[in-house]
Image (cartoon, grey):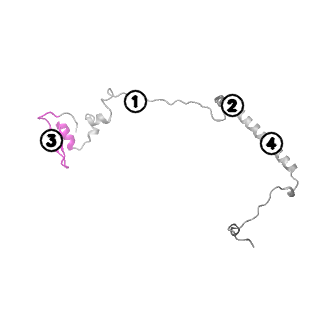
Amino acid sequence: MSEHRIYPGNGKLFIRRDGKPVFLGSSKAYSLTLQRKKPSKLVWTQVWRRLNKKGISETTSKKRTRKTVKVQRAIVGASLEDIKKKASQKSDFRTAQRAAALKEAKAKAKAAKATAKKTKKGPAASTHVKAPKFTKRANKGVTQR
């Protein structure tokens, strides 16, 4: 139970119900075994010391862990300086820029629409040609009626 050394002539041999012999070094260990106490709950046993990492700190040193270091890299189409510059800008400035770009895009689209309207002279000026319609039978080599 305690895993302490049992010297010759000392202790008791206890045969468990499953037939396994257990050598008990003291009456204390024998009494606690009969009470079915778990060795892992008894502070003075080797099992408890192993579970709670007692007495092994001097043999093993603590494993050192490395901290991850964040590195900024350039993305395709934007250099590192551009990215840093954008990060340092205030959000108000960026929203104003976005609004201006949106306004410009809308103006371009409106101008393109106006030029398309001027060049188009009604439905007859359509350049779209309708393709002839084929049925499955026509594709197989059967002539259409």
Tell me the amino acid under the disc marked 1: Lys
Q: Residues within 10 Å of mark 4 (few under 14, many from 20)?
A: few
Distance from disc 1 to disc 4, alpha carbons, whole Å, reads 63 Å
Label 3: few (<14), some or many (≥20) within 10 Å? few
- Position of the C terminus, as image quadrant, is bottom right
Where disc 3 sits, the SS reads strand
Compute the Cα span from label 1 to label 2. 43 Å
Q: In the image, which is nearer the foreground, mark 1 or mark 4?
A: 4
Instruction: Tell me the number on the disc at residue 108.
Output: 4
Check contact, mark 1 vs mark 2: CB within 8 A. Answer: no
| Nearer to us in this view, 6 or 144 | 144
Q: Is residue 127 above or below residue 135?
A: above
Circle 1 or circle 3, nearest the eye: 1
Residue that mark 1 sits on: 63
Mark 2 = which residue? 90
Q: Is residue 8 above or below residue 124?
A: above
Identify which amino acid the numbered label 2 is placed on: Lys
**What stretch of residues is rendered in magenta?**
6-34
The Cα–Cα distance between marks 4 and 2, rounded to whole angstroms, is: 28 Å
The residue under the point 14% across, 39% down is: 12
